Structure formats: structure tokens, C-alpha cells
Amino acid sequence: MTDRKTELAANLAAVEERIASACAAAGRERDEVTLIVVTKTYPASDVRLLSELGVRHVAENRDQDAAPKAAACEDLALTWHFVGQLQTNKVRSVVGYADVVQSVDRVKLVSALSAAAVRAEREPVCLIQVALDAESGERGARGGVAPDGIEELATAVADSPGLRLGGLMTVAPLAGPYAGRQQAAFDRLLEISSRLRGNHPAANMVSAGMSADLEDAVKAGATHVRVGTAVLGVRPRLG
């Protein structure tokens, strides 16, 4: 193996051990948690190596980086997740490659995604991004909708052609009552998810946890964890 592939393999093995241990501690099966490797700022060559190492889910947060990378890797059996704040003028491009859009946080975005999905004859899965640092009617500092706005958005997604409601996503907040309290934040997300499934039973995805706090997310019941640095390390940024 190349030096880079060896490095990635070792990092993946370490992350896999962390996830497996967290699942065991929480009394969960390992296959209940999907690892998404966040490849933002890393080249398409790393994505290819990750695919060779068995990774099947990758995530990006900027369309200008993601679109050419996805095109360069279109021959690979990968599920692409878009996890960044999404402007409506980027929706048509994102729908072209993203299988899952994890950052849905306003009705205007739902409308744009639906129109683009129908035009492209694609059906992306949409996750509502929950901002646990947002007051009622506001968006979070890192995107996302306040908890009391989730049902309106979920209904909009469920009623929109070309879209599938998958569940919820959050980023541990840097401010507000949950700042520095990742476990409490993720526990709160799971409570919200349970309520959401009352009206939308198929919306069972819960995306939470990153390199530093994936164990807290697994303990809370997350179905997907988004890990970047722990797998890819610190690398020069693209462009």
C-alpha cells in the first residue's frame, strides 16, 4: 500500500474501534451506526483510497469543492452527503451528486430542492438540521432551525415531489444552553427525533457526532456519525 493509504487504513481502524467500543458500551449493535467520512478540503485521490478501504459514505460541505470531486469519483460506489449550509443558488448543482442533503433548515430551501430534484429526476434524502442554540423562529449560528420549527419543515419535505424525509441532523452548539454539553445536546436531538417519528415513521436517521464527540452521539442513539480529522488527519486545504 502507498504511505497515504496505509495512513488512512490505520486511522479508519482506530475510528472503527472507537465506534465499536461505543456501541458495546451503549448496548447497541455495530451495524446500527453508519460512518460518514467528511472529505472536505481533501483531494479526490483520498476519496478513491477510502473507497478501496471499504468506505461507502462520504460528506462535503462546500459545493465548489464537492461538485468536481464527485464528478471525478462518479465511477465509485459511494453515497454522497452534503452537510454544509446550502444557498438556493447552489441547489441545482448539489442535487446533481448528493444522495443525502443533511442541512435543510428553511422552507425556501425545500422548494428549491424539490424543483431541482424533479428536474434532475433524482430523489435526495433530506435531513432537517436542528439548531439547539436557536431561539424560536431563528436559525442557528452554524445553520439549522430552532426545535419548534422542525415539524413545519418536515411536513414541507414530506409533501414535496422529488424529496424523501430521512430524519434529523445537528452539530453540537458552541453557544446557548448546550454549549460544551455534547451528551445533553445529542440526548435532546434523540428526544426530538422520537417525536418526529410519531408523524413521520420513516424519518429514522439521526446524524450527530464528529471526531471529538462520536462516543457521546453513539451513546445517545445516533444512526450516523460524521468523522473527518480522525480519519484524514490535518492536510493542506484545497485551493
Image: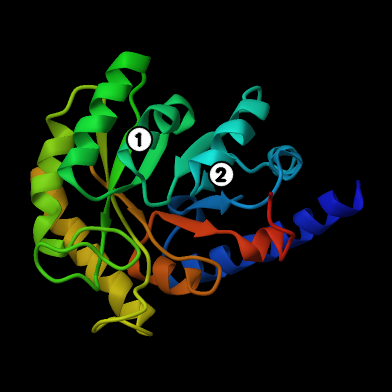
122 or 195, nearer to the observer = 122
Q: Residue at x 31, y 68 (%)?
A: 141
Q: Residue at x 10, y 50 (%)?
A: 151
The image shows residue 205 at horizontal and vertical percentages of: 32, 48
- Please report whichever mark, 2 or 1, sits nearer to the chain's N-terminal start: 2
Q: Residue at x 82, y 58 (%)?
A: 7
Image quadrant where residue 9 sits = bottom right
Q: Which residue is mark 2?
A: 58
The image shows residue 95 at horizontal and vertical percentages of: 40, 29
Q: Are marks 2 and 1 in contact (CB under 8 Å)?
A: no
Looking at the image, residue 171 lies above or below residue 168:
below
Which amino acid type is marked by label 1?
A: Asn
142 or 181, nearer to the observer = 142
Report the Cα–Cα distance between label 2 and label 1: 23 Å
Classify residue 178 as left or right of residue 28.
Answer: left
The image shows residue 77 at horizontal and vertical percentages of: 60, 28
